[in-house]
Image: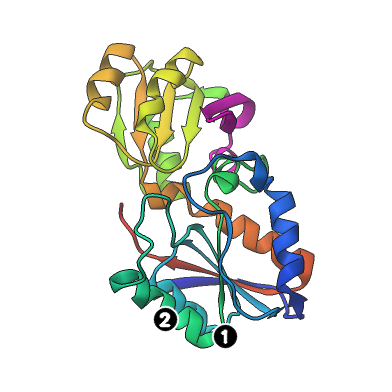
Amino acid sequence: MNLAKKTGIAHMAHLSAIESHLLELLNVSAFDDYCPNGVQVRGGEEVTTLVTGVSASVALFEAALAHNAQLIITHHGMFWNKDSRVVEGQLKQRLKPLLLHDVTLMGFHLPLDAHPELGNNAQLLKMLELEPGEPFAGYRGSALSRLGRWRTPRSAEQVKALLVERLGAAGLFLEFGPEQIQTVAICSGGAPELIAEAQRAGADLYLTGEASEPVYHFAQEMGMHFVAAGHHSTERFGVQALGEHLAQEFGLTHHYVELNNPI
């Protein structure tokens, strides 16, 4: 079962124009990523309906076909640098509906994490009512996020309640930091290893999507709160914001499809 969010009244746009716009908007060429960003499967040139989702999957593609979409945009695309180049098995299964129906798939990974307005981290800062500060989460020369601060410090219980309200759950919350939390470091997805950078930046709490075994003792010894709020959960918002931007910019109908993923 999926939940879909729709925006826009359909007008026809050209795929090439959407592609050029996104490459410039997200500054794709500036990122040394470990996957291709942009078009991963090229379909037809005419686009009226866009579907967005967190990760490429058969379930997402089937939902897109049900919406008669010509374009799918995800944060986690279908191809990664470490993958085999042989088209077989799961990859073949995923490609089949796209090729059969001439649907385009685009993926934007680190460029979508990092965008200062539409990105996953910028959206998380906004949703958690944090005022953005200095850059945080450097990766191969690019900052993926910023520190955030609350004007009025909050207790751990208040932060948990906010996470439940805005993200649907508080996730794994390790309470090793100060009683009053004001400075928060955020990096969406799977980045528990950045806890040391968060401490050096002066954060009271570090929030990411996933935990790793060493993080428990690191957080305890550093005297810092740590939250693993879910890889999927922390990366839902950038692709939605991007889809809504394209709906306004090109007059597309946009459906965000939420596929349950507790990880």
Identify which amino acid the numbered label 1 is placed on. Asn
Q: Is residue 131 magenta?
A: yes
Mark 2 — residue?
A: 96
**Disc 2 residue crowd, few under 14, some 14–19, many 20+, Cα 10 Å:** few
Instruction: Answer whether labels 1 and 2 touch (C-beta < 8 Å).
Output: no
Q: Position of residue 158 (x, y in %)?
A: 42, 33
Q: Position of residue 12 (x, y in %)?
A: 76, 80
Residue visible at 49% across and 26% down?
A: 184
Mark 1 — residue?
A: 68
Identify which amino acid the numbered label 2 is placed on. Lys
Name the one closer to the observer, 132 or 17: 17
Name the one closer to the observer, 188 or 164: 188
**Residue 170 vs residue 35: left or right?**
left
**Residue 234 vs residue 9: left or right?**
left
Q: CA distance from mark 1 to mark 2?
A: 16 Å
Our reading of the magenta stretch's main secondary structure is: strand
Residue range corresponding to the magenta coloring: 124-150
Above-or-below relation of 128 to 46? above
Above-or-below relation of 127 to 45? above
Badge nearest the viewer, 1 or 2 = 2
Name the one closer to the observer, 84 or 39: 84
Residue visible at 61% across and 25% down?
A: 135
Earlier sequence position, callout 1 versus callout 2: 1
Name the one closer to the observer, 204 or 82: 82
Q: Secondary structure at mark 2?
A: helix
